[in-house]
Amino acid sequence: MNSDYLLTQEIGSFRKPEYLSRKFRSLDENELNELASKATFETIELYEKAGLDNIGVGGEMFRWEMYEHPIRRLDGIIVHGPVRSFDNRYYNKGSVVNKLKRIKSFHMEEIQLLKKLKKKNIKIPITGPYTLMDWSFNEYYRDRYELAMEFGKIVNQEIRELKEFWGDDLLQIQIDEPAATTHPAEMTTVLDSINESVRDINGIEVHLHVCYSIDYGLLFNIVPDLKVDYYNLEFANRDSLNLNADRIGYADVKRFKDAMDVTSRKIGLGLGVTDVHIDDIETVDLIKNRIEYALKFIEPDRLRINPDCGLRTRSREVGYNKLKNMVDATREVLKNL
């Protein structure tokens, strides 16, 4: 069997150990690096025990959440108080008041650690330019499009620095865009800002992660023009836990196939098969059924298997068991290909 078929991947956050989460915001830089490194080691061990082919960055132990982490490393933006995010968590929203300037890498600590550990099966998640724009107040740039493009240039700088550090080996970059389809009239802004993020950067495999979209069709319409290799999407959250039910939660797999068919580049789908917002552990048989449904439309060398999103809202035990069943189900499907 081709070793590139149905690769299993981690695509986001994982619950931090209590020794890190309890103290996270009070730690100085050295203390944070020490404890986040320890938590990363432990989380990678869990991922490898579960059998994952791709370990991401070990659960995003170096950041509290996806917006404030990069924003705190920019000049030109003032950070205000907390607002509620989509998963009942909070982030501190910022106002762009001057020209944006990146003053520090967002993810260098993580990639340095992973290179030291000699890990190659990684994927660096970077908050996308459209989401950074949408979740910020704009008090400086002409309009939302101009601000999104400026964030695109910032993300491009970040990816270039990470790639330069990583060297000649292929580097997987995942652009996280939870806001991508929230404003249907702005899909051109989504398209242009994401493309700006990866413009003229070689030696990377670009992933796009969009979760909990009201209408993935808005995304699929721009797929032919996006410079993206893999689309890591959510499906399990909208599907039934009943093994014998119609896989109505996966209806958009066919729509993605239609988008693939009119795209000149070879692209693939990261299939969300476990719901990260429930403690129920999806059975191996259920996950197999979901994968087999997707294989009716997507070739196995273009399909990767992942949770819907990051698992930070679940306990580490629940998260591990979901990943383990995901891997076991994928291996069962592979036996029959």
Image: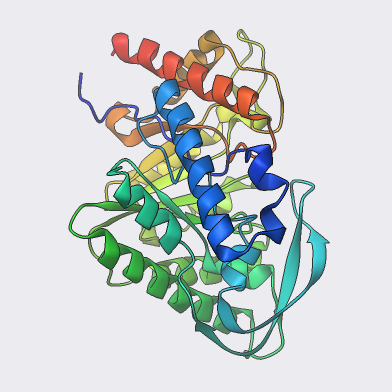
Quarter of the image for the C terminus: give it.
Answer: top left
Q: Give the vertical position of 71 relative to 253 (above or below).
A: below
Q: Name the residue: 55% across, 24% down.
A: 320
Q: Name the residue: 43% across, 54% down.
A: 110
Q: Give the vertical position of 177 relative to 280 (above or below).
A: below
The part of the image, by quadrant, that contains residue 273 is: top right
The part of the image, by quadrant, that contains residue 249 is: top right
Is 283 situated left or right of 269 in this image? Answer: right
Percent position of residue 317, x then y = 62, 23
Percent position of residue 270, x then y = 44, 37
Nearer to us in this view, 289 or 330: 330
Number of numbered discs present? Answer: 0
Nearer to us in this view, 57 or 96: 57
- Look at the image and tell me whether residue 263 can be seen: no
Q: Name the residue: 41% across, 63% down.
A: 108
Is 24 situated left or right of 320 in this image? Answer: right
Percent position of residue 100, x then y = 55, 85
Q: Give the vertical position of 322 relative to 289 (above or below).
A: below
Percent position of residue 133, x then y = 62, 72
